[in-house]
């Protein structure tokens, strides 16, 4: 009896769900630097990113439960935004930030779970690991936005960045994640420093653990392959 075909495995690496998700994440990050956090363009970018993440979660994890959980978070976030704008008659920036933080955190958890469930290293595994690293920077950026909303003096932003702090804090998050540390933005409050330290620490631990995991999987696969050929 022939084995069932796996359409995902037959796809070239550049057509796999993890690679496409990585391209979307990097593209949205690049475009968001020029669009900002308000206006129609920002809503379209956010909608594209969420749709891509939902599709990525479904395809990469192959878990209907993961898709349902993330979809519920999106629906609750949209309903909450509409209610706040209608009832309070003001933009729901704080609610949106919380909703995005929960949504991206859920996607991050599902992708990490899927990554550590992998039995061998392939292109999708590598690209999924890269997507997790980028999502970690995005999640921490939303955390920084909440810290700034509670305490505008938590970061050393210039006057231009204070008008729309989201792009600046996203930039700060990734410079912290990669331990580049340009010094253009500094954490001033205890909470901002703590989250910054945690982000840098988690990033280094993630790279070390995932690299060890991928190498271990590849070694095990090579031994099984060589054992089967001998």
Image: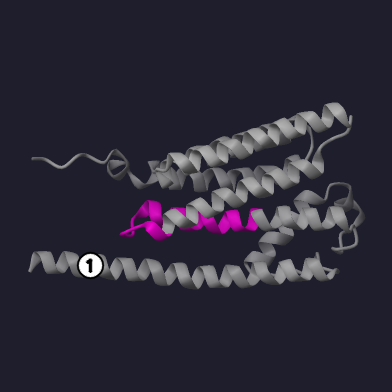
Q: Quadrant of the N terminus?
A: top left
State which region is magenta: 116-138
Q: Nearer the viewer, residue 27 or 82?
A: 82
Q: Nearer the viewer, residue 53 or 77?
A: 77
Q: How many marks?
A: 1
Residue at the extreme top: 86
Q: Nearer the viewer, residue 126 or 64?
A: 64
Q: Residue at x 69, y 32 (%)?
A: 78
Q: Residue at x 78, y 32 (%)?
A: 39
Write down the quadrant of residue 151 in the picture.
bottom right
Q: Residue at x 88, y 33 (%)?
A: 90
Residue 216: % across, % down: 34, 71
Task: Please say if 75 is above or below 168.
Answer: above
In the rendered image, residue 35 lying in the magenta stretch gets the answer: no
Mark 1 — residue?
222
Residue 209: % across, % down: 47, 71
Task: Please say if 26 is above or below 117.
Answer: above
Q: Secondary structure at mark 1?
A: helix
Report if residue 36 is visible in the image: no
Left or right of 72 on screen, residue 96 = right
């Amino acid at each position: 009896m022939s084995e069932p075909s796996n359409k995902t495995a037959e796809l070239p690496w550049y057509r796999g769900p993890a690679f496409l998700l990585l391209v979307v994440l990097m593209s949205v990050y690049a475009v968001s630097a020029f669009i900002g956090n308000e206006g129609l363009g920002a809503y379209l970018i956010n909608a594209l990113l969420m749709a891509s993440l939902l599709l990525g979660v479904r395809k990469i994890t192959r878990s209907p439960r993961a898709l349902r959980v993330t979809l519920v978070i999106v629906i609750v976030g949209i309903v909450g935004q509409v209610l706040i704008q209608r009832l309070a008659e003001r933009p729901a920036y704080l609610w949106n930030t919380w909703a995005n933080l929960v949504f991206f955190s859920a996607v991050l958890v599902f992708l990490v779970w899927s990554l550590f469930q992998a039995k061998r290293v392939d292109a999708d595994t590598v690209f999924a690991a890269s997507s997790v690293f980028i999502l970690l920077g995005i999640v921490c950026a939303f955390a920084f936005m909440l810290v700034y909303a509670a305490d505008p003096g938590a970061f050393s932003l210039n006057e231009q960045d204070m008008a729309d702090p989201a792009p600046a804090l996203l930039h700060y998050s990734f410079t912290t994640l990669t331990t580049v540390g340009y010094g253009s933005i500094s954490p001033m409050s205890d909470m901002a420093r703590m989250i910054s330290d945690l982000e840098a620490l988690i990033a280094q631990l993630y790279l070390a653990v995932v690299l060890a995991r991928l190498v271990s999987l590849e070694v095990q696969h090579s031994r099984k392959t060589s054992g089967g050929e001998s």
